[in-house]
Amino acid sequence: MVSVGDSSSSRSPLGRNICTQGSASTSTAKKDRHTTGRSMRTIRSNFYQNDDSSCSFTSSVPQRSGCVSENLTESVIDMRLGQLASKSNAKSVKSDSETEGFLDISQAFSDFSACSSDISGELQRLATLPSLENALVNESGNGAVCEPEPCQGFLQRENFSTEIIESISPEDLQPTVKICIDGLQSPSIAVKRSAAAKLRLLAKNRVDNRESIGESGAIPALTSLLRNTDPWTQEHAVTALLNLSLFEANKDRIINAGAIKSLVYVLKTGTETSKQNAACALLSLALIEENKASIGACGAIPPLVSLLINGSNRGKKDALTTLYKLCSARQNKERAVSAGAVRPLVGMVGEQGTGMEEKAMVVLSSLAGIEEGREAIVEEGGIAALVEAIEDGSTKGKEFAVLTLLQVCADSIRNRGLLVREGGIPPLVALSQTGSAKAKHKAEILLRYLRESRQEPLCFSP
């Protein structure tokens, strides 16, 4: 029996709504679902009757008590589909629905697409880095301290994070920046690292600092450090460029310095933090429409997909956001599908409670805008995952799931048949009755498509 329940109901591995006294059955059900893979896909198929006379589904819609339910029998479904058929033609509202859906998609990333500087918490690393004095001794090779350079007195000062950010006045900023830029040109890796770290902190919070540093010519020097073999120097440089990119005029300066290819290099070779901040820097640059094609052409999509698969939770979120922004360009959609983005995205949709399932559905919705994307979603089991999201997901998650299914099934009778086989009709009927206004609207359109398909031979292989 396929169930349609609210968020307060516990769900057994067979999908029935259960009134529980504790959380034990809920955790067991979730564990069973994750350990057995997409078990609901097999369960749904068992309830699909592949004959000409009937297509039997049974489900329950929870009432206010949480235990009383109403069976969604064949006759109930047919009655609901008949009501929907009497409404205006679905195709006449298709474009409005898609436009509305993509507006919803744009809002889904509002919580972290603003690209806050130093979002990955790299400042914790500063306390663990070797001191500049010790590093200079090590670089000399014989235990003697290297001859101090003009900027080293400033660069060796301790507690620079508080001292620079809070104490440097606007009139003292330019000489400070000049000292740091001189440090970036030093033959000493330790001096370069310290200079990049200070520029990064100067650009962290103050808009006027970002403007002044960008105008001073620091960006080309920082860009050259993106390929530095010292991982901490590379990390400070990429984070400094991320912070500077938040000032609009610096975006062009970063592009003109040839930083895109170097940022892609960091995505491939950097520390976890460097990869995260390289992704965010590319996201910041992609806010200018004409940069999206260049970023994709420079090879950014495959390492972003790799970060999506292998990164930390923070890295995965950064990759999701950047992919979403880049994939508004059709060529980047094609690149993302070719790079294998659909499989991990479908996997994330099925991982309820991670905080990334909604974002993954948003990117899937974007990729479903091209034929290759729709084919990949079906091939990777996306229909089953999206049906489960309609059953178990959040309010927003249900909206994104039904939007993606609408794109996948709108022009494909075969995909509509697959949706029926996955038990999609009962949760869609329930969503058309109890979902949000936007979800209801999209569910009704999709149900009308399915009604049309029930009146035609289903062209798919069993």
Image (tube, grey):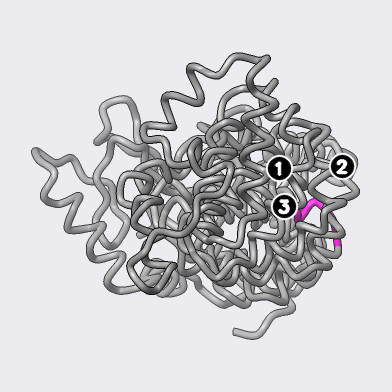
Which residue is tagged 3?
221
In the picture provided, is 183 more to the left or to the right than 213? left
Q: Which comes before the other along the chain, label 3 or label 1?
A: 3
- Label whose residue precedes the other's in the sequence (2 or 3): 2
Q: Nearer the viewer, residue 73 or 25?
A: 25
Nearest to the observer: residue 4 or residue 107: 107
User: Residue placed at 77% from the left, 63% from the top?
Assistant: 333
State the extent of the magenta-drawn residues as a range: 326-330
Instruction: Assess disc 2: are there few (<14), some (14-19) or many (≥20) residues with their C-alpha within 10 Å of its C-alpha.
Output: few
Quarter of the figure with the N terminus: bottom left
Q: Which mark is residue 284?
A: 1
Residue 392: % across, % down: 41, 47
- Residue at label 2? 95
Magenta run includes residue 13? no
Q: Under tag 3, what secondary structure? A: helix
Q: Is residue 333 left or right of residue 197?
A: right
**Number of other residues with Cα within 10 Å of mark 3, as a class: few under 14, some 14 to 19, many 20 or more:** some
Image coords of residue 37 (percent x, y): 36, 73
Is residue 328 magenta-colored? yes
Pointer 3 with pointer 1, Cβ within 8 A: no
Q: Residue at 73% x, 39% y: name it.
A: 101
